[in-house]
Image: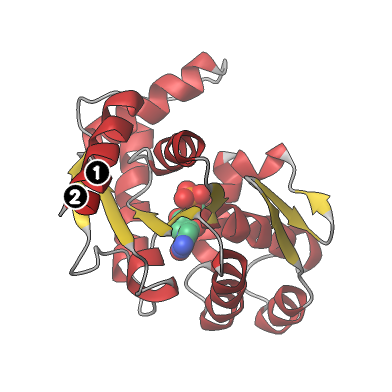
C-alpha cells in the first residue's frame, strides 16, 4: 500500500507522515529532502540555482536509495543541513525546474515501487503516484503554520520574527501553488485533513480512522 501525504509548508506533513509510517510499520520517504539536497548542491557546486546546465548535469548523477525511513544519496545518509531554512528556500527555487522535477519524480516512483510506504511531498497524489491507494492532503491556516515554525525556531534558540515567517510562508505558498509544473494542489480523490488547532497525535489518529473506514468500506 502506498499512502501519499501532501500539503503546504508548515502543515505538519513530515512529522505526521513519519509518525503514521511508524504506527503502520511502513517505510517512509520525505520527497522535500530530495529537493532540499539538490538546492544545497546547486548552491555549492553550481554557484546558484540559475546555472541550468550545471544543475541538470548534477541532478542526473544522483543515486538515491531508501532504507526504511532513511534516505541515502550515493550510499551516504543525507545530513542535517538540509533541514535549514536556507535549504528550504533553495529547494523551492529548484523545484520549479522541469528537469529537476522529472529526475526526482522518477526516483520517487522507483523508490516507492513494491513497498508499503508513506510518501510525503507536494505533488505525490497528483503527479508522482496518481494511482496511490490512499491520498491525504493536509491543510492549516497560514497563521497557524507560521506560529508552529516560529515556536520551533525559537525553541532551537534562533532569533526570529513571527511577521517575517508569516511573510515567507505566504511567498512559498504562492511559488509552490502557481508554478507551471506539478503545482501544489490536492488530487481530486484526496481526503483533506485540517490540522489547525490539532496535535500531531490527533491528526495521525484521524488518518488511521480514515484508513480503517476505507478498509471496512
Ligand atoms: O516539504 P519541504 O519543506 O521539505 O519542501 C521544500 C521545498 O521543496 C518546497 O518549497 C517545495 C519543494 N517540493 C516540491 O516541489 N515537491 C515535492 N514533492 C516536495 C518538495
User: In terms of image quadrants, where is residue 75?
Assistant: bottom right
Distance from the alpha carbon under mark 1 to that under mark 2: 6 Å
User: In terms of image quadrants, where is residue 126?
Assistant: bottom left
Query: Would you say 168 lies left or right of 115 here?
Result: left
Indicate which disc residue 212 carries. Answer: 1
To which residue does mark 2 refer?
216
Pick out the residue farthest to the right: 75
Quarter of the figure that contains the N terminus: bottom left
User: Which residue is at a point 26% across and 64% down the rendered structure image?
Assistant: 185
- Callouts 1 and 2 close, C-beta under 8 Å: yes
Pick whichever, 59 or 157, lies toward us. Answer: 59
User: Which residue is at a point 61% across and 73% down the rendered structure image?
Assistant: 110
x and y, in percent, of residue 74 in the image: 83, 62
**Tag count in the figure?**
2
**Labels 1, 2: front one:** 2
Disc 1 packing (10 Å; few <14; some 14–19; many ≥20): few
Secondary element under disc 2, as helix, strand or loop, is: helix
Q: Is residue 47 visible?
A: no
Disc 2 packing (10 Å; few <14; some 14–19; many ≥20): few
Pick whichever, 3 or 142, lies toward us. Answer: 3
Note whether 16 is above or below 60 in the view shown.
above
Quarter of the figure that contains the C terminus: bottom left
Pick whichever, 190 or 40, lies toward us. Answer: 190
x and y, in percent, of residue 143 in the image: 23, 33
Secondary element under disc 1, as helix, strand or loop, is: helix
Q: Is residue 191 visible?
A: yes
Amino acid at each position: 500500500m502506498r499512502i501519499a501525504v501532501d500539503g503546504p509548508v508548515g502543515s505538519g506533513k513530515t512529522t505526521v507522515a513519519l509518525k503514521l509510517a511508524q504506527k503502520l510499520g511502513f517505510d517512509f520517504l520525505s520527497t522535500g529532502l530530495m529537493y532540499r539536497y539538490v538546492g544545497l548542491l546547486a548552491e555549492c557546486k553550481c554557484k546558484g540555482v540559475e546555472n541550468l546546465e550545471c544543475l541538470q548535469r548534477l541532478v542526473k548523477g544522483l543515486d538515491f536509495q531508501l532504507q526504511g525511513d532513511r534516505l541515502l544519496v550515493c550510499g551516504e545518509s543525507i545530513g542535517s543541513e538540509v533541514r535549514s531554512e536556507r535549504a528550504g528556500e533553495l529547494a523551492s527555487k529548484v523545484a520549479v525546474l522541469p528537469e529537476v522535477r522529472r529526475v526526482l519524480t522518477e526516483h520517487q516512483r522507483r523508490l516507492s515501487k513494491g513497498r508499503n510506504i508513506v510518501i510525503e511531498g507536494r505533488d505525490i497524489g497528483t503527479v508522482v503516484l496518481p494511482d496511490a491507494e490512499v491520498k491525504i492532503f493536509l491543510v492549516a491556516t497560514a497563521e497557524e503554520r507560521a506560529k508552529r515554525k516560529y515556536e520551533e525556531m525559537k525553541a532551537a534558540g534562533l532569533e526570529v520574527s513571527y511577521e517575517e515567517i508569516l511573510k515567507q510562508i505566504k511567498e512559498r505558498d504562492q511559488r509552490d501553488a502557481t508554478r507551471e509544473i506539478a503545482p501544489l494542489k490536492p488530487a481530486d480523490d484526496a481526503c483533506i485533513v485540517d490540522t489547525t488547532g490539532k496535535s500531531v497525535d490527533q491528526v495521525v489518529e484521524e488518518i488511521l480512522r480514515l484508513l480503517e473506514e476505507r478498509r471496512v468500506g
